């Protein structure tokens, strides 16, 4: 086991010997922001060391994956690092999560998943999770509530089409309602307050967003939306004629839909 003194020393470690940790909370890295950081590193180097653990094959990255990726992009062969072989798997996960939360570098859904895993590891209440990561109980509860969102709506939150305020409100709805109201928010650029007012008005009139649609169509829409990770609507008349509509919000999202149905551009 590494002593506390040794654990705090900074050393240069070859970049090609480092691999991301399997328990890293962060999964998405903005390409433009990564390029900007790479340019900064070319000019000034890596200011803050990454945190690693020794493995048979090299080093496992515990904290600082964005710096490590940008350093690779900048063409560096080594990166300053602190090696923490004194940490258990659980401690390593907590260190990485706390660093990402402090830097606000996780997407909303990555934050929610990380907080959930932390609570499960130690059987913590929302308040105790907050104490571990230096956040309020309300902060923790609001993010954990996002895990009640349908997968396509979670994707919209991560991509920035819906903000956490919208997501918090949508999470209280049934999956099919979440998808329809998320689409309404994006199409009409509703603020959080406007969404609240529209939902309140709908409840007061005791109407459903798209009333009169048979339950089997709603099931089909929900399953297709889950499959394609985009809002899907299906409409048909008594003769069986109708349309299937897939709504996407960016060309990248369209590419994802095409890939899921097996289409490849020639």
Image (spheres, grey):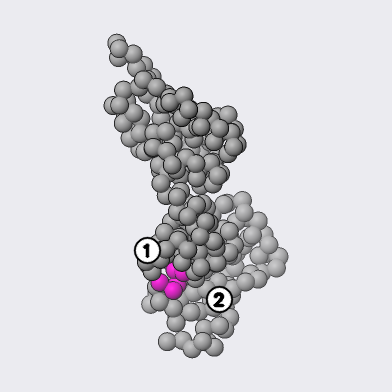
Mark 2 Cα within 10 Å, few/some/many (few <14, many 20+)? many
| SS assignment for the magenta stretch, majority | helix
Q: Position of residue 135 (x, y in %)?
A: 55, 63
Q: Position of residue 62 (x, y in %)?
A: 48, 70
Q: Is residue 260 above or below residue 55?
A: above
The residue lying at 45 percent from left, 50 percent from top is 145
Quarter of the image holding residue 187?
Answer: top right
Q: Is residue 251 left or right of residue 207?
A: right
For disc 2, the marked residue is 81
Q: Position of residue 49 (x, y in %)?
A: 59, 73
Q: Position of residue 9 (x, y in %)?
A: 57, 83
Q: Earlier in the sequence, mark 1 or mark 2?
A: 2
Secondary structure found at label 2: strand
For disc 1, the marked residue is 120
Mark-to-mark CA distance, 1 and 2: 29 Å
Mark 1 Cα within 10 Å, few/some/many (few <14, many 20+)? few
The magenta segment is: 90-94
Q: Is residue 12 above or below residue 184?
A: below
Q: Is residue 81 above or below residue 153?
A: below
The residue lying at 43 percent from left, 42 percent from top is 172
Query: Is disc 1 in contact with disc 2, using a CB cutoff of under 8 Å?
Result: no
Question: What residue occupies the far top of the structure in this picture?
Answer: 239
């Amino acid at each position: 086991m590494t002593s506390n003194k040794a654990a705090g020393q900074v050393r240069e470690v070859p970049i090609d010997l480092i691999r991301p940790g399997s328990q890293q909370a962060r999964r998405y890295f903005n390409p433009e922001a990564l390029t900007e950081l790479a340019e900064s590193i070319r000019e000034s180097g890596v200011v803050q060391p990454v945190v690693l653990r020794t493995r048979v094959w090299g080093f496992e990255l515990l904290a600082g994956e964005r710096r490590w990726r940008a350093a690779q992009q900048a063409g560096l062969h080594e990166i300053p690092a602190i090696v923490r072989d004194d940490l258990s798997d659980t401690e390593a996960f907590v260190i990485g999560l706390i660093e990402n939360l402090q830097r606000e570098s996780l997407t909303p859904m990555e934050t929610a998943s990380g907080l959930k895993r932390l609570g499960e590891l130690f059987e913590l209440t929302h308040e105790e999770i907050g104490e571990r990561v230096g956040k309020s109980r309300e902060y923790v509860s609001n993010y954990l509530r996002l895990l009640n969102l349908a997968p396509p709506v979670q994707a919209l939150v991560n991509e920035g089409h819906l903000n956490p305020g919208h997501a918090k409100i949508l999470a209280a709805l049934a999956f099919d309602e979440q998808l329809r109201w998320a689409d309404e928010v994006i199409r009409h650029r509703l603020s959080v307050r406007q969404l609240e007012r529209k939902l309140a008005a709908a409840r007061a009139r005791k109407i459903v967003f798209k009333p009169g649609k048979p339950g089997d169509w709603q099931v089909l829409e929900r399953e297709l939306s889950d499959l394609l990770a985009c809002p899907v609507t299906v409409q048909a008349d008594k003769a069986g004629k109708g349309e299937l509509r897939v709504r996407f919000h960016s060309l990248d999202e369209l590419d994802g839909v095409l890939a899921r149905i097996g289409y490849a551009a020639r």
